[in-house]
Image: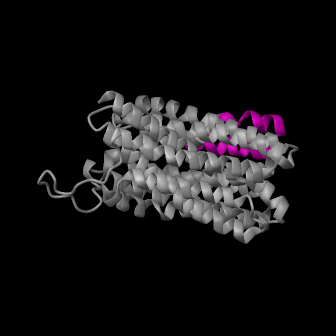
């Protein structure tokens, strides 16, 4: 049974690696698309928003559909459609077709977070769930770092079209592997309702509405900050003299820091509590984004890894707190709701910051992004009564 749980965790982690790779290579491609298609910053933001908005929109439907069809089928289908979307984007000749293809790809990728989390939660129902989910989250950040760096280098050699198509073909192969592997493990089947003579729990299963709403609000601000910064980071670094290949390296530094942050912030939260950890990482995020904006290129590159720790470490702490505020019977729905709200904020942010960048320029925009994240500090006071530190971290 333990080996089966580990195999399911490995499969879910691989899926997370792949899908986060799809999401993050957009950041590498955005300045290339802006140059080739003559895009404004608002259009750049719309592309990012289309993909992330699609992901957000399909989180809840995916959670409900999985109860009827099972996670395995939806994960495979969503992965395949996402991959095909990136393959087709390689033939896009203008802004509108590219926007539509990435919207479809984003919708399909919306299956990953709630369904993979559900698979891992079920596999580790009797214990070590936090460790397993932490491993699953870490795999996603490794995918962000590795894929962004690899595709950035590949795009510099063969162009963004060939690089994107290559990763899309890999995704199609992974979709086939998902069906085979999870099928052999007997994981991801549709649940038989009423088989044990029990009555399904109704509603969302949220035990503390005030705490859950505060947690979601913090997550929305945190996600919007992260997406806003990453969308326009390449532009400010390239203005300082960084090349295309260097952009991939810059994202790798941020995402390696983010992967480290998943573990470091968890350890810090265990010692000092969730609230103090979130406040610490959000203040660090503000200071380090301001450093990237104002510093010369070598120093700006030098702070990207610690910035990644703060950017992604916060989300890991928040994600681990969701389970403390909801009943186990409706955990998948609650996670889907949390993901919908936070990823929805991520989807809206690039377009909003794109408008601001067109009006004021990228440096003032990223300065404003860094200051908005401080809104989370008073929100932490609202969350505090629902969190018992440090055990709930």
Name the chief secondary structure element in magenta: helix
Q: Who is closer to the viewer here, 182 or 355?
A: 182
Image coordinates for residue 373, horizontal then vertical, percent: 59, 52
**Quarter of the rendering occupied by the C terminus:** top left
Residue 72 magenta-highlighted: no
Image coordinates for residue 291, horizontal then vertical, percent: 74, 41
Dividing the picture into quarters, in which one does residue 308 lie? top right
Apparent side of residue 138 relative to residue 144 in the rendered image (left or right): left
Any part of residue 363 in sight = no
Kindly give the residue lying farthest to the right in the view shown.
241
Q: Who is closer to the viewer here, 376 or 52?
A: 52
Image coordinates for residue 238, horizontal then vertical, percent: 84, 48
Dividing the picture into quarters, in which one does residue 309 lie? top right
Count of marks, rendered view: 0
Give the color scheme: rainbow, by chain, secondary structure or one colour: one colour
Q: Who is closer to the viewer here, 279 or 250?
A: 250
Kindly give the residue lying farthest to the bottom in the view shown.
96
The residue under the point 88% across, 44% down is 241
Residue 304 magenta-highlighted: yes
Q: Who is closer to the viewer here, 36 or 263?
A: 36
The residue under the point 64% across, 45% down is 286
Write down the region rendered in magenta.
282-305
**Quarter of the rendering occupied by the N terminus:** top left
Image coordinates for residue 6, horizontal then vertical, percent: 39, 31
Kindly give the residue lying farthest to the left in the view shown.
197
Dividing the picture into quarters, in which one does residue 147 lie? top right
The residue under the point 76% across, 36% down is 301
Any part of residue 364 in sight = yes
In this view, 106 is above or below 271: below
């Amino acid at each position: 049974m333990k080996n089966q749980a580990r195999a399911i965790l490995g499969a879910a982690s691989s899926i997370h690696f792949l899908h986060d790779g799809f999401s993050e290579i957009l950041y590498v491609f955005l300045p290339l698309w802006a140059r080739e298609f003559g895009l404004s910053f608002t259009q750049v933001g719309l592309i990012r928003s289309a993909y992330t908005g699609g992901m957000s929109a399909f989180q809840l439907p995916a959670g409900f559909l999985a109860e009827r069809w099972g996670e395995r089928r939806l994960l495979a289908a969503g992965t395949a459609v996402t991959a095909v979307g990136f393959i087709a984007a390689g033939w896009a000749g203008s802004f509108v077709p590219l926007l539509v293809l990435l919207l479809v790809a984003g919708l399909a990728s919306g299956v990953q977070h709630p369904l993979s989390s559900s698979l891992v939660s079920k596999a580790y129902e009797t214990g070590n769930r936090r460790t397993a989910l932490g491993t699953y989250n870490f795999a996603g950040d490794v995918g962000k770092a590795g894929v962004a760096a690899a595709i950035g280098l590949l795009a510099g050699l063969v162009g963004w079209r060939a690089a994107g198509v290559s990763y899309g073909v890999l995704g199609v192969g992974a979709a086939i592997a998902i069906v085979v592997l999870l099928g052999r493990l007997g994981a991801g089947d549709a649940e038989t309702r009423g088989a044990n003579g029990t009555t399904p729990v109704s509603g969302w299963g949220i035990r503390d509405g005030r705490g859950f709403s505060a947690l979601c609000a913090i997550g929305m601000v945190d996600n919007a900050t992260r997406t806003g910064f990453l969308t326009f980071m390449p532009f400010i670094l390239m203005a300082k003299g960084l090349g295309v290949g260097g952009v991939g390296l810059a994202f790798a530094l941020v995402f390696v820091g983010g992967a480290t942050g998943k573990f470091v912030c968890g350890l810090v939260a265990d010692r000092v509590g969730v609230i103090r950890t979130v406040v610490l990482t959000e203040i660090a995020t503000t200071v380090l984004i301001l450093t990237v904006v104002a510093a010369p290129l070598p120093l700006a590159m030098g702070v990207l890894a610690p910035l990644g720790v703060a950017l992604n470490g916060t989300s890991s702490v928040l994600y681990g707190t969701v389970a403390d505020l909801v009943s186990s019977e409706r955990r998948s729905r609650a996670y889907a709701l949390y993901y919908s709200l936070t990823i929805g904020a991520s989807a809206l942010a690039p377009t909003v910051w794109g408008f601001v960048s067109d009006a004021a320029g990228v440096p003032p925009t990223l300065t404003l992004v860094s200051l908005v994240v401080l809104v989370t500090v008073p929100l932490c006071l609202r969350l505090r009564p629902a969190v018992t530190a440090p055990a709930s971290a």
